[in-house]
């Protein structure tokens, strides 16, 4: 798995890595779902396109993950497949998913706490803190 939980005093923290920025966003979504224990149910497939712009990659990541939190909580949808495109300050994600069967713990918000996407030997890496 290209993500791992990091011990955090009050919230949840996740370290994610991928070869490129687009992969980092997709793995961050998968990692967030794994952290919450979210599982898809049988049912009709759901598709969505999410588009936004922001001044930096960190703000794009928070906007994307916040959209996934909204879909879980308000629409009962979990997305499993992501086709991520990032160009300058614009993000476009085509998502494919299913109805939500269950979630173990609700994520209230994606935070900017110590959020910094950085280049590493394995590509890109970020640590994300979630308010739970």
Image (cartoon, helix red, strand yellow):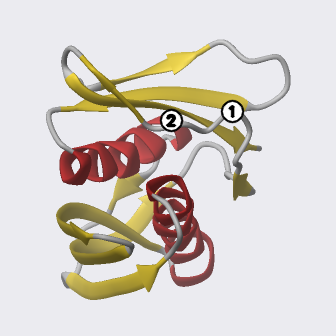
Q: How many marks?
A: 2
**Vertically, is 36 above or below 79?**
above
x, y (%) of residue 38? 45, 50
Residue 35 is marked as 2
Specify the quadrant of the image occupied by residue 96.
bottom left
Q: Which residue is drawn at 19% across and 19% down?
A: 122
Instruction: Please identify the residue farthest to the right as the structure is shown.
Output: 10
- When the figure is inspected, residue 90 is found, relative to residue 119, above or below; the finding is below
Q: In this view, does 29 lie above or below 10?
A: below
> Which residue in the structure is indicated by mark 1?
114
Question: Residue at horizontal 51%, vertical 20%?
Answer: 5
Q: Which residue is drawn at 66% across and 44% down?
A: 105
The residue mark sitting in front, 2 or 1, is: 1
- Which quadrant would the N terminus be assigned to in this image? top left
**Are there few (<14), some (14-19), or many (20+) residues within 10 Å of tag 1?**
few
Image quarter in which the C terminus is found: top right
User: Label 1's element?
Assistant: loop
**Position of residue 12 in the picture relative to residue 70 (left or right):** right
Residue 16, given in percent of the width and then of the height, sits at 38, 30
Q: What element carries label 2?
A: helix
Query: If you read the primary sequence from the N terminus, does the residue marked by circle 2 or circle 1 appear first?
Result: 2
Q: Where is residue 14 in the image (x, y as percent from the top left)?
A: 52, 28
Answer with left or right where residue 41 lies relative to residue 56.
Answer: left
Q: Are marks 2 and 1 in contact (CB under 8 Å)?
A: no
Residue lying at 19% horizontally and 47% vertically, measured from the top left: 23
- The front one of 107 and 39 is 107
C-alpha separation, residue under disc 2 versus residue under disc 1: 19 Å
């Amino acid at each position: 798995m290209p993500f791992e939980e990091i011990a955090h005093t009050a919230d949840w923290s996740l370290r994610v890595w991928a070869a490129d920025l687009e992969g980092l966003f997709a793995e961050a979504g998968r990692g967030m779902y794994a952290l919450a224990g979210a599982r898809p149910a049988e049912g009709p497939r759901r598709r969505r396109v999410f588009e936004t712009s922001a001044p930096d990659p960190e703000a794009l990541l928070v906007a994307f993950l916040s959209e996934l939190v909204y879909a879980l909580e308000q629409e009962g949808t979990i997305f499993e497949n992501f086709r991520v495109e990032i160009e300058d300050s614009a993000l476009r994600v085509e998502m494919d998913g299913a109805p939500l069967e269950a979630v173990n713990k609700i994520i209230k918000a994606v935070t900017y706490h110590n959020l910094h996407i950085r280049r590493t030997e394995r590509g890109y890496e970020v640590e994300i803190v979630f308010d739970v």
